C-alpha cells in the first residue's frame, strides 16, 4: 500500500448553541431561617461546559460516478459531547453567609455542568491534532493485514493432508505422553502420597503442548480429510467453476465489545461538577459522594476483496486437465501438494516461529502468487472503532434537595478507516512488483486502474 489517506481533507465543528449570555442558574438566600422565603442574590451566566457539540474530519478521494465502481483509502473521525443536560434545586443544610437579610441558607436553581477533566481531555480540546493526519484516536490496523488476506482470498486447499502425513511419525510419542498423563492421574486417585510429579510445571507444559499442538491440529486435519472425501466431487466442481473467474469475498475479522472502569479514574468526593464544587452548594449532601469513569470499546473490522486464481489442471480446456490432472486436483483439494507452505508447516516447531514472526504468512503469500497465481483486483480492510466514555457522579443529596441522585454525562470517539491493498497484499506496493508479478497481473487482466 502506497498511502493510507485520501487526497481530500474536510472538517467541520458544530458549536455550542448556548452563548455566554444565557442564564445557567440562579442563587437565592433565605430571608429568615427555615422561612422558605427566598431572595435572589445573583444570576450565573454561561454555557453547560461544552466547547462544541461535535467535531469531525474526513480524508477521502473523489471517485468517478455514478455508478461508483472504485474505492480507496478513507478515514473519518468524529468527536461528540453528548447533550445530557441536568437541572437541580439544591438547598444548603446550614447557614452559609451573613447578608443584609441575616444568616440564611442558600438555594441553587439551575443547571449542573459536567467536569472539565476527562480521560483524553487534551485530545478533545486540541482538535488540530486529534482530527489531523496523526490523530491519536486512529487505531493501528497493521496486525489485521495478514488475516485480511488469508481469510478473504480463495481457498484452494481444503485440508492439511500433507502436514498430517508428516506428523504421523509423532503419533506414538503423542500417545505415550497422553497415556503417561492418565497413568499419573490414576496413581493420584489410588492414594499416592505426593502429587508433585503430576502437578510439576514440566508435566503440565508437556501435556499442554501435546494437546494443543499435537492432537488438536492432527485430529483437525484428519477430520478435514474425511470431510473432503465425502464432498470431493462438489468441492472440485466449485474450484473448477471458479478457476480463472473473479470471486468476491468478505470476511469479518473483529467483532468485539469491551466495557469497564477506566483505570485510575474513580474516587470519592466531587469531581469538578458545577455548582457542587463551589460554596453555593458545598453542604447540600449527606454522606460521601463518589465518582467514576466507564469506557466501552466497540470494534468491528471486515475485509472485502475480489480475487482471481488460475490452475491449468482445473481448466477443462487445458491440456493439463486430463492425465495426471485428476490426481493433481485431488492433491490440491486435500492439501497434499508438495508446496512451500506445506513443507514449512511440516517442519517441527514452525508453529512457534509463527507466534513471533510473519514467516509462515510470507511463505503462504509466495505460494499464493507463484503456485496458484492468486491476485486481487481489489482488497479493502475496513475498521470501525467506537469509544464511549461515561462519567457518573453519585451525590447523596439531603431531603430538601431531593435525595440521593446520580448525574451521568458521556462523550463519543467514532473512528472509521479503510485501507487498500495492492494485488499481492498490504505490504507490497505497485512500484515494487517483480516481472513475475506483472506477468501474473497481465494474465489475469488486472491493471493499476482496476
Image: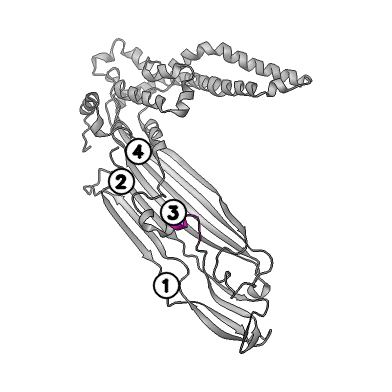
**Residue that badge 3 annotates:** 413
| Most common SS among magenta residues | loop
Task: State if disc 1 and disc 3 touch (CB < 8 Å).
Answer: no
Residue drawn 59% across the image and 74% down it: 279
Give whichever of 426, 432 is nearer the camera. 432
Q: Residue furthest front?
A: 98
Is tag 2's residue or tag 1's residue first in the polypeptide sequence?
Answer: 2
Residue extent of the magenta highlight: 117-122
**Screen quadrant of the C terminus:** top left
Secondary structure beneath disc 1? loop
- Assess whether residue 119 is covered by the magenta stretch: yes
Task: State if disc 4 and disc 1 touch (CB < 8 Å).
Answer: no
Mark 2 to mark 1: distance in Å? 35 Å
Give whichever of 398, 167 is nearer the camera. 398
Is tag 1's residue or tag 4's residue first in the polypeptide sequence?
Answer: 1
Mark 1 to mark 4: distance in Å? 44 Å
- Among the 4 quarters of the image, the one containing residue 204: top right
State the mark number for residue 304.
4
**Residue that badge 1 annotates:** 18
**Residue that badge 2 annotates:** 5
- Assess whether residue 149 is covered by the magenta stretch: no
Amino acid at each position: 500500500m502506497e498511502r493510507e489517506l485520501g487526497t481530500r481533507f474536510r472538517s467541520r465543528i458544530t458549536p455550542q448553541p448556548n452563548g455566554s449570555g444565557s442564564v445557567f442558574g440562579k442563587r437565592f438566600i433565605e430571608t429568615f431561617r427555615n422561612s422558605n422565603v427566598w431572595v435572589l442574590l445573583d444570576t450565573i451566566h454561561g454555557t453547560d461546559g461544552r466547547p462544541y457539540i461535535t467535531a469531525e474530519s474526513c480524508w477521502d478521494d473523489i471517485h468517478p460516478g455514478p455508478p461508483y465502481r472504485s474505492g480507496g483509502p478513507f478515514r473519518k473521525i468524529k468527536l461528540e459531547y453528548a447533550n445530557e443536560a441536568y437541572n437541580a434545586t439544591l438547598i444548603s443544610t446550614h447557614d452559609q453567609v451573613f447578608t443584609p437579610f441575616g444568616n440564611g441558607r442558600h438555594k441553587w436553581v439551575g443547571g449542573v455542568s459536567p467536569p472539565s477533566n476527562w480521560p483524553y481531555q487534551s485530545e478533545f480540546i486540541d482538535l488540530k491534532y486529534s482530527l489531523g493526519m496523526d490523530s491519536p484516536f486512529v487505531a493501528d490496523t497493521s496486525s489485521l493485514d495478514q488475516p485480511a488476506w488469508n481469510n478473504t482470498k480463495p481457498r484452494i486447499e481444503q485440508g492439511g493432508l500433507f502436514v498430517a502425513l508428516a506428523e504421523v511419525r509423532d503419533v506414538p510419542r503423542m500417545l505415550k505422553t497422553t497415556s503417561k498423563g492418565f497413568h499419573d492421574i490414576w496413581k493420584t486417585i489410588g492414594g499416592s502420597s505426593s502429587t508433585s510429579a503430576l502437578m510439576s510445571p514440566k508435566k503440565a507444559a508437556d501435556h499442554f503442548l501435546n494437546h494443543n499442538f499435537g492432537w488438536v491440529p492432527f485430529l483437525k486435519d484428519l477430520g478435514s480429510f474425511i470431510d473432503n472425501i465425502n464432498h470431493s466431487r462438489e468441492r472440485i466442481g466449485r474450484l473448477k467453476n471458479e478457476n480463472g473467474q473473479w470471486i468476491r469475498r468478505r470476511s469479518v475479522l473483529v467483532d468485539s465489545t469491551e466495557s469497564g472502569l477506566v483505570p485510575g479514574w474513580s474516587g470519592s468526593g466531587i469531581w469538578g461538577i458545577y455548582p457542587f464544587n463551589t460554596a453555593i452548594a458545598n453542604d447540600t449532601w449527606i454522606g460521601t459522594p463518589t465518582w467514576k469513569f466507564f469506557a466501552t470499546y466497540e470494534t468491528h473490522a471486515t475485509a472485502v476483496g475480489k480475487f482471481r486464481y488460475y490452475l491449468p489442471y482445473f481448466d477443462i480446456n487445458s491440456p493439463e486437465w486430463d492425465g495426471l490432472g485428476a490426481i493433481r486436483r485431488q492433491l490440491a483439494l486435500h492439501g497434499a501438494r508438495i508446496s512451500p507452505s506445506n513443507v514449512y508447516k511440516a517442519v517441527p516447531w514452525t508453529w512457534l516461529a509463527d507466534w513471533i514472526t510473519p514467516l509462515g504468512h510470507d511463505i503462504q503469500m509466495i505460494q499464493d502468487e507463484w503456485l496458484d497465481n492468486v491476485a486481487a483486483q481489489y482488497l479493502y480492510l475496513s475498521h470501525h472503532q467506537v469509544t464511549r466514555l461515561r462519567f457518573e457522579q453519585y451525590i447523596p443529596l439531603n431531603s430538601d434537595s431531593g435525595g440521593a441522585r446520580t448525574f451521568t454525562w458521556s462523550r463519543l470517539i467514532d473512528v472509521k478507516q479503510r485501507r487498500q491493498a495492492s494485488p499481492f497484499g498490504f505490504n507490497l506496493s505497485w512500484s515494487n512488483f517483480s516481472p513475475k508479478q506483472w506477468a501474473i497481473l497481465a494474465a489475469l487482466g488486472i491493471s493499476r486502474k482496476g
